[in-house]
Amino acid sequence: MSGARQNALGSLQTTCAQLGRAEVRPGQAASFAEVTAPCLSAAFAFEDLQAVDEVYEGDKPGFVYSRLGNPTVALLEEGVAALEGGGSALAFSSGMAAIATALFGLLSPGEKVVAHQEIYGGTRSLLANLLRKWGIRVEFCHLGDASAFRRALDDGAKVVFVETITNPLLEVLDVEALAGDTRQMGSLLVVDNTTATPYLAKPLSMGACLVVESLTKYLSGHGDVTGGVLCGSPEVISKVRETRDILGTALDPAQAWLTLRGLRTFPLRMKLHCDNALVLAKYLSSHPKVSKVFYPGLEFHPGHRVAARLFGGRGYGGMVSFEVRGGRDEAERVLRRLKRVNLVPSFGNTATTVSHPYLTSHRGLSPEEKEALGITEGLIRVSVGIESSSDIVEDFQRALG
Ligand SMILES: *Cc1c(COP(=O)(O)O)cnc(C)c1O
């Protein structure tokens, strides 16, 4: 790893390790709480009418009402902005709340969104059902296909939506190149960075206009938070903030506090998720009962070179998908025989979990749509945890038999 990269990682570690320290040292006492307490107040009290004026006009710092802003949520937002490498951040009650609020805030009826064909099921439903119902034009295509992408942007798209690493097939598109093309066409690139996280990629520095992270996954990292966050330029964020204030999709301060706690160990956890995932992916690709392995860290993965460049050698993510020979029956047999690994339709917790995309995240698609995407009944997605890698491999070895 180069010196510059090591410094970047070192500063990420330092930023995270120091998140959530108490900043305010109350007047009289000779000591103060080391860790910030969550501020659960729904509303804030003012000294007098002059203070009301000053806070509402933004002349003095202060909070009004937690739907509009809260000190613990603000602390998390500052932390996330630092992790994303700049801009302003806004936190939401879930990743979907973040995406929905952003798109409702940025788009008007008649405008168009172009999205990559393989995206999170919830985002797909939002685009294909809800946004279309409100008169927004939506087109799905493979954004890695340059001519399809140009065609889709031809009649003027306001927003282009993509994920850094797709799920469950773990494709890696060249976000840097997409950002350049998107800007040239006058569109805004929105990148869902939930699977890559700012440990691997900072889409704003690659030219994206807005980045989305589901806090529910790696950022909180312990499976006990539901939340989401957006980060972007102050102008874009202020537009989305107005929409968040109206819709009431802000994050709950207790969840913000838990996320701050989880974030302190985020770079350490991510390193282990990535290291262990590579070990498991290599093991699975040599197993006779496994027909396909999807992991960008494997040299034969079609996105390997792009991933190596975009992720700067820090790793290739914590998720591995594989297909067993024998379809659903064999997948069922493997899932039943795993001892240490639970079947959970989420990812990013410390413990390794597996999911079955065909029956969970992509359940809403028709069998033909799933086949076209390559999501089969034998496909198993692993969220590789931070246990010892030999324990993880041993469990899959036993289950595959
Ligand atoms: C989980 C997830 C979301 C949605 O986040 P929630 O917190 O569950 O609402 C969005 N995008 C991706 C890639 C996800 O994995």
Image: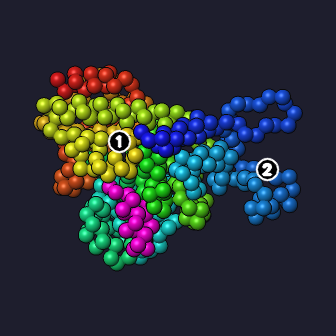
In the displayed image of the protein, which residue is found farthest to the front? 3
Name the residue: 42% across, 39% down: 1
Residue 357: give x, y in percent of width and height.
28, 44
* SS for dot 1: loop
Q: Which residues are magenta?
A: 173-190
- Residue 72 or residue 275, whichever sits in front: 275
Callout 1 crowding tier (Cα within 10 Å): few <14, some 14–19, many ≥20: many
Q: Residue at x 28, y 60 (%)?
A: 144
**Residue 141 relative to residue 63: left or right:** left
Q: CA distance from mark 1 to mark 2?
A: 48 Å
Q: Give the residue at mark 2.
A: 45
Chain-order first, disc 1 or disc 2: 2
Which residue corresponds to the image point at 34% horizontal and 73% vertical from the top-left? 153
Amino acid type indicated by mark 1: Tyr
Membership of 180 in magenta stretch: yes
The number of numbered badges drawn on the structure is 2
Q: Nearer the viewer, residue 123 or 271?
A: 271
The amino acid type, in three-letter code, at marker 2 is Ala
Q: Nearer the viewer, residue 234 or 74?
A: 234
In this rendering, position of residue 154 left or right of residue 21: left
Q: Is mark 1 within 8 Å of ligand 1?
A: no
Can residue 327 be seen at all in this image of the molecule? yes
Q: Position of residue 273 (x, y in %)?
A: 39, 34
* Residue 316 circle label: 1
